[in-house]
Image: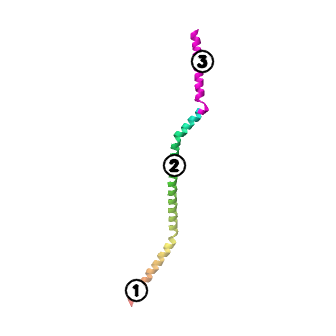
Amino acid sequence: MEDQEMQLKVKRVTDKFTENMYVLANEPSVALYRLQEHVRRSLPELVQHKTDMQSWEEQSQGAIYTVEYACSAVKSMTNSSLYFKSIDGLLRQAISMKEQISTSQGRR
């Protein structure tokens, strides 16, 4: 009988102990502590990722500006073909006039 009573008491004590451990392990303050612990461990890495992303954003913005500027320069060059044709015509006229002047001076 004493063994059964002892076993029953031991079972009650272990059940109570297990229940208390479960309550302590799942207490909100412990959960908040674990959350704080997680944030402290992961925050520096997140900050590093953020600064890396900001740096990459700045670099990509610079590259985008450069590409847009190059595209506008190419567009303005294609639009200036009319002016280059006009300059070509004027140069041909000037060369022709120079040749005419040279031939007329050569006759004299």
For image coordinates 52% across by 44% down, the residue present is: 46
Q: Is residue 77 magenta?
A: no
For image coordinates 40% across by 85% down, the residue present is: 102
Q: Which mark is residue 26?
A: none
Q: Which residues are magenta?
A: 1-29
For image coordinates 40% across by 86% down, the residue present is: 103
- Tag 3 near tag 1, CB within 8 Å: no
Looking at the picture, which amino acid does disc 1 mark?
Thr
Q: Quadrant of residue 96?
A: bottom left
Q: Quadrant of residue 3?
A: top right
Looking at the picture, which amino acid does disc 3 mark?
Arg
Is disc 2 surrounded by few (<14), some (14 to 19) or many (20+) residues within 10 Å? few
Is disc 1 surrounded by few (<14), some (14 to 19) or many (20+) residues within 10 Å? few
Q: CA distance from mark 3 to mark 2?
A: 56 Å
Q: Is residue 3 magenta?
A: yes
Name the residue carrying label 2: 51
Labels 3 and 1: the sequence-earlier one: 3
Labels 1 and 2: the sequence-earlier one: 2
Labels 3 and 2: the sequence-earlier one: 3
Q: Secondary structure at mark 3?
A: helix
Q: Residue 86 location in percent, x, y? A: 50, 75
Residue sitting nearer the eye, 80 or 3 = 3
Q: Which mark is residue 103?
A: 1
Q: Residue 26 location in percent, x, y? A: 59, 30
Name the residue carrying label 3: 12
Which quadrant would the C terminus be assigned to in this image? Answer: bottom left
Q: Is residue 96 above or below residue 16?
A: below
Q: CA distance from mark 3 to mark 1?
A: 128 Å
State whether the magenta stretch is mostly helix, strand or loop: helix
Q: CA distance from mark 1 to mark 2?
A: 74 Å
